[in-house]
Amino acid sequence: SQQGEEDPQALSIQEGENATMNCSYKTSINNLQWYRQNSGRGLVHLILIRSNEREKHSGRLRVTLDTSKKSSSLLITASRAADTASYFCATDRVQGAQKLVFGQGTRLTINP
Amino acid sequence: NAGVTQTPKFRVLKTGQSMTLLCAQDMNHEYMYWYRQDPGMGLRLIHYSVGEGTTAKGEVPDGYNVSRLKKQNFLLGLESAAPSQTSVYFCASSPRVPARTNQEQYFGPGTRLTVT
């Protein structure tokens, strides 16, 4: 079963707007990662947030983690057409060794 | 560095045929993984390896076998392909890190397999 569930499944916004995607998970984790997948390509790592961190920034990306609610959010500010892609959260499990469980993804479309 | 490469990029098989997908990485990573991705779904782990000569089952291992004879290569085999194995297959690798931590995984470009 999927550990991570993204919400929404699809999001369409205008270029320049901010995009927010959410991820919920079920079991305790060591960390949570976000990946991007352009159409027909492999996944690319965006950011990793550890279970003892609450917020992390990388360029136009901001990730938050709320372990009490078992949820995370990815915010992309000032979106660009090149941000059009699917975004996946991935979680490990405290007892797991180097294995990630991916959510179903949010398909983000940035309209020019 | 080429990173993670996969061959072939595309393949069409008839039901019952066999094939091997090859994954190669030049980053000296200890861990390697095979995933499948179906439409509208995330990635599901098929098998993984934590080092040369070792493999383990993931979430959906049935119908697949793997081998890691060399550290840089991870092979995924389908002995008797079925239409349910039509999917896009991704290989990934990651470096060894201390227990209870994690590292990003580096993905290959994928192999699109159709079984008719």
Image (tube, coloured by chain):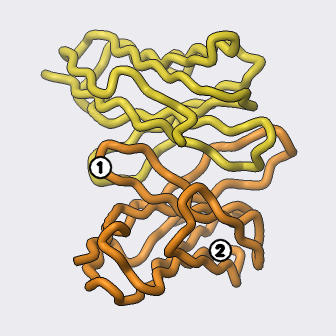
Chain colours: A yellow, B orange
* Residue B11 showing in the rendered view: yes
Residue depicted at x 57% and y 17%: A71
Amino acid residing under circle 2: Gln
Image quadrant of residue B82?
A: bottom left
Residue depicted at x 55% and y 73%: B24
Residue B54 location, x and y as percent? Answer: 76, 73
> Badge 1 is on which residue?
B39
Is B86 situated left or right of A71 in this image? left
Residue A98 badge: none
Q: Chain of mark 2?
A: B
Residue nearest the viewer, comparing A99 with A18: A99
> Badge 2 is on which residue?
B72
Residue A97 location, x and y as percent? Answer: 77, 49
Q: Residue furthest left?
A: A112
Residue B5 location, x and y as percent? Answer: 47, 69
Earlier in the chain: of badge 1 and badge 2, it is 1
Graded by Cα atoms within 10 Å as few (under 14), some (14 to 19) or many (20 or more), the crowding at tag 1 reads few
Q: Is residue B98 above or below residue A54?
A: below
* Residue B3 showing in the rendered view: no
Residue B48 location, x and y as percent? Answer: 65, 63
Q: Chain of mark 1?
A: B
